[in-house]
Amino acid sequence: MDRQNLTLLTDLYELTMMQGYFKHKDRNDMVIFDAFYRSNPCGGGYAIAAGLEQVIQYVKELHFSQEDIDYLASLGIFEADFLEYLKNFHFSGDIYAIPEGTVMFPREPMVKVIAPIMEAQLVETAILNIVNHQSLIATKTSRVCFAARGDGIMEFGLRRAQGPDAGVYGARAAMIGGCIGTSNVLAGQLFDVPVKGTHAHSWIMSFPDEYTAFKTYADMYPSACILLVDTYDTLKSGVPNAIRVFTEMREAGIPLTFYGIRLDSGDLAYLSKMARKMLDAAGFPDAVISASNDLDEFLIDSLKAQGAAITSWGVGTNLITSKDNPSFGGVYKLAAVMGPDGKFIPKIKLSENTEKVTNPGDKVIYRIYEKDSGKVKADLICLAGETFDEAEDLMLFDPLEPWKKTRMRGGTYRMRPILQHIFHKGECIYTSPKVMDIREYCRQELDTLWDETRRLVNPHQVYVDLSARLYDIKIQLLDQMSEK
């Protein structure tokens, strides 16, 4: 994780293609690549952009060290003149991206790279690796937080993450997606986010009895006293001993600022409701009841529907791995090449699968909001340079099913460009916000979605439409390809 130069974090074929471009093509030919995804993860209605700060760090550090050159030479497939060229390699192009924390939808560019073809080819793998992972975890987290209906979600999946990087950057993405804290201390240090935690069953078991374990912990951490009550018997032992400790704290004049219990096994709905009655009867109505135990958005939603008296949730494995949907599926496709006249020539990829046909050209994204509600109506992908007058009617149509049309009356909507300029001629011109600021921005973004889009099952899909000009170019290219 300490290695900042991730230049060799790439697939071998990126380098073999680079050598091919070096030998047989003008290495300075300008191209446009789009990174995008085809379907929302977890069967949802949206995704959350995350990972841009790490993409920026990667591009800034992009260079081949002598150690890298020596290793590539040892493979026996790269020629000396190409390896000599790599010694002075650096990124000189432009990058546009959807800012972290932004709600996004399928088929629209998450990242757009405009650069000489060798440079644009090299960065493919690392960009996808970074953005795919963090966007997946941020999206999963936002679903878990939605299911909790305002309750706090703490991320503590480090021990179940697929390695240190996934644990650290997964925690970062989880904070962007809405968690109130993480158990990951390194993530707390690196990203200046809250770290939270209680104690394990081993703490209880290491003492002669449960009460002594609770009492010792409360003496040490009186202002953050959450006691794990299910080591022996939740209702007969754990909760009564916790109440005993809380009573002694109150009698000793110790302020009960943040205190309560945690459940980690059993029927969480039943146990939480019974524990709530016991705590209330003992005079502790503000005691927190937190829960863990292989939670995800569906189980939390079910527990809320059952009236579980839980107001704080610890989510680990199913969040940090996005267990039900462990891959985001982002891809990186060529969209245009620059012609001799300095203008970009749109390129398209065909497929027998309709959803795999790409959108050609140099594109930008406009988000369209209803003025009355402030909610997202659709996203419009159009050609760079296209302008629109919000006072005029706007016709929207589904590019896959163009007979589905919606007319937005002039004055009833507003438009906002989504892609931001990140690198200009190899120099970073964008400053990444702090993670907690991104988290707040993400919360505001999610508020622009209809509840029908955020629901966990069979959500309403936000339309991602093409402008008439872009649609016409796409149809022309499809017609030309079919004639060949």
Image (cartoon, rainbow, N blue to C red):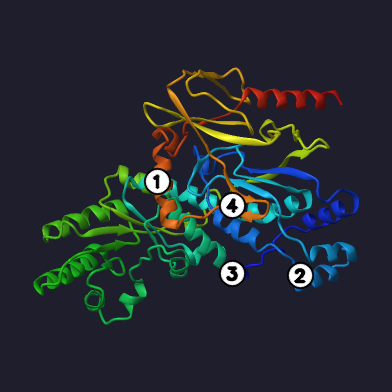
Does label 4 or label 2 sit earlier along the sequence?
2
Looking at the rendered image, the quarter that the C terminus falls into is top right
Give above or below for 244 relative to 19: below
Q: Which mark is residue 443?
A: 1
**Real-space CA distance between mark 1 and mark 2, rounded to the nearest whole angstrom:** 42 Å
Residue 31 position, x and y percent, is 75, 43
Give the secondary structure at mark 1. helix
Does label 4 or label 1 sit earlier along the sequence?
4
Q: Label 1 near label 4: C-beta < 8 Å?
A: no
User: Which residue is labeled 2 in the image?
Assistant: 68
Which one is in front in this view, the residue at disc 4 or the one at disc 2? 2
Q: Is residue 412 left or right of residue 383?
A: left
User: Which residue is labeled 3 in the image?
Assistant: 1
Does label 3 or label 1 sit earlier along the sequence?
3
Residue shown at 75% from the left, 51% from the top: 121
Q: Which mark is residue 131?
A: 4
Residue type (three-letter) at the residue carrying disc 4: Val
Disc 3 packing (10 Å; few <14; some 14–19; many ≥20): few
Residue type (three-letter) at the residue carrying disc 2: Asp
**Real-space CA distance between mark 4 and mark 2, rounded to the nearest whole angstrom:** 24 Å
Residue type (three-letter) at the residue carrying disc 1: Arg
Residue 257 position, x and y percent, is 20, 64
Disc 1 packing (10 Å; few <14; some 14–19; many ≥20): some
User: Camera-side residue: 17 or 411?
Assistant: 411
Residue 419 position, x and y percent, is 57, 41
